[in-house]
């Protein structure tokens, strides 16, 4: 069985440095055997938002770009988990829940498909430990007009 690091490498990825919070909150809280990850927006590895990931689904942002944005959010979630526990393979028992917020026009009905970008990535990297419960919500606005934001809860050792 391959490790999360090997799966990331096979995808041509390395996790970025965990992003620092930009307001009065912490990027994660560990309580008992849970780590709660604050919402992560779709920053690229360079710490910037790609213009294709800014704006609303159903308007400026295409479905393909929305899925890619959700995947970036999941990458940033895993970076925070790694910062919290040190190692995805030895520290993470299970991704318990993902919560997705999709910046969308009111008539956009494809929210679940966008969030699959994050869910599919979590399973691709963590295998069965990446299978999770999930909520997906369309919202009127997100910080920096990001297309997607994802929060998470993990069971850890």
Image (cartoon, helix red, strand yellow):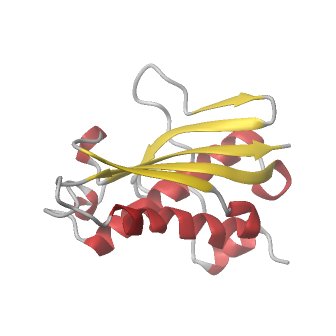
Outermost top residue? 24
Q: Quadrant of the N terminus?
A: bottom right
Q: Is residue 6 left or right of residue 58?
A: right
Q: Residue at x 76, y 44 (%)?
A: 155
Percent x, y for residue 105? 17, 54
**In the foreground, 116 or 37:** 116
Q: Quadrant of the C terminus?
A: top right
**In the foreground, 107 or 75:** 107
Q: Is residue 4 left or right of residue 80?
A: right
Outermost left residue? 59
Percent x, y for residue 58? 18, 64
User: Can you say whether 139 is above or below 45 in the image?
Assistant: above
Percent x, y for residue 81? 66, 46
Q: Residue at x 23, y 45 (%)?
A: 145
Residue 68 seen in the current view: no
User: Can you say whether 142 is above or below 76 in the image?
Assistant: above
**In the foreground, 26 or 100:** 100
Percent x, y for residue 93? 81, 52
Q: Is residue 15 left or right of residue 19?
A: right
Disc tally is 0
Q: Is residue 123 left or right of residue 106?
A: right
Residue 2 seen in the current view: yes
Q: Quadrant of residue 69?
A: bottom left
Q: Residue at x 19, y 54 (%)?
A: 55
Q: Residue at x 56, y 68 (%)?
A: 121
Q: Quadrant of residue 14?
A: bottom right
């Amino acid at each position: 069985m391959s490790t999360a690091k090997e799966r990331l490498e096979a995808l041509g990825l390395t996790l970025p440095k965990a992003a620092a919070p930009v307001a009065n909150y912490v990027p994660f809280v560990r309580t008992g055997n849970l780590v709660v990850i604050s919402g992560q927006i779709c920053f690229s590895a360079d710490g910037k938002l790609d213009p294709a990931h800014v704006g609303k689904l159903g308007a400026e942002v295409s479905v393909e770009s929305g899925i890619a944005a959700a995947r970036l959010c999941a990458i940033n979630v895993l970076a925070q988990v790694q910062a919290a526990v040190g190692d995805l393979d030895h520290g993470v028992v299970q991704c318990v829940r993902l919560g997705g917020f999709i910046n969308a026009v009111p008539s956009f009905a494809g929210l679940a498909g966008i969030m699959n970008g994050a869910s599919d990535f979590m399973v691709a990297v963590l295998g069965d430990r990446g299978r999770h419960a999930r909520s997906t919500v369309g919202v009127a606005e997100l910080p920096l007009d990001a297309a997607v934001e994802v929060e998470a809860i993990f069971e850890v050792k």
